[in-house]
Amino acid sequence: MSSNTPGPEQGPYDPQANPYAAPPPPQQPPAQPPQYPGAGYPAAPPVYPGAAGMPMQLSNGMGTAALVCGIVGLVCGITYFLWVFAVILGILAIIFGAIGKGKVSRGEANNGGSATAGLVCGIIGMVLPAIYLAALDAAVDSVF
């Protein structure tokens, strides 16, 4: 007795269902979803060559180091008994200031004022002990 009429639909927990049967195919979505006006994303802006990527990070360390060394060297130069530190820090401030000014001129840094101030303070910090020593030498020569 074979019949072509379908019987009651079998559920997933029907004990008479074949557990090894292929699952029924999923329902097909419509060929094209309905389009609504203005539902898409706006167009991306044009990309220009060389404009992509992160901007260059500025390296202001040399100008800042020149300023710190110059100020500390100037303070050491004012106090007579720390003249050795004034000379060492003055030399470092001049070197760091020159490097910092070079970076500013190449566009790698933007603290040219700090580099210049460190350079000037370093020069003054080195000159003050030389003036003190020359004055001390003159005073000793006049006494003896």
Image (cartoon, rainbow, N blue to C red):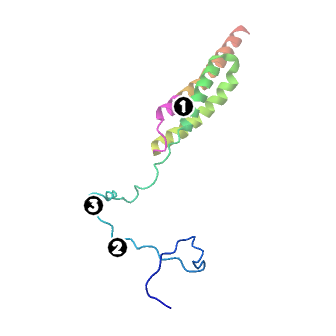
Q: Quadrant of the C terminus?
A: top right
Residue 116, how many percent across, how many down?
Answer: 50, 32
Q: Which residues are magenta?
A: 107-119
**Contact flag, marks 2 and 3 (Cβ < 8 Å):** no
- Disc 3 marks which amino acid? Tyr
Q: Residue furthest bottom?
A: 1
Query: Helix or strand or loop: what does disc 1 sit on?
Result: helix
Q: Quadrant of residue 83?
A: top right
Image x and y of residue 89, in percent: 64, 29
Q: Residue at x 46, y 51 (%)?
A: 54
Q: Quadrant of residue 48?
A: bottom left
Kindly identify which residue carries mark 2. Answer: 31
Q: Secondary structure at mark 3?
A: loop
Residue 4 appears left or right of 88: left
Instruction: Name the amino acid, label 2.
Output: Ala
Up-down: is 97 above or below 16?
above
- Against 75, residue 122 (above or below) is below
- Label 3: few (<14), some (14–19) or many (≥20) C-alpha neighbours in 10 Å: few
Amino acid type, residue under disc 1 in the picture: Leu
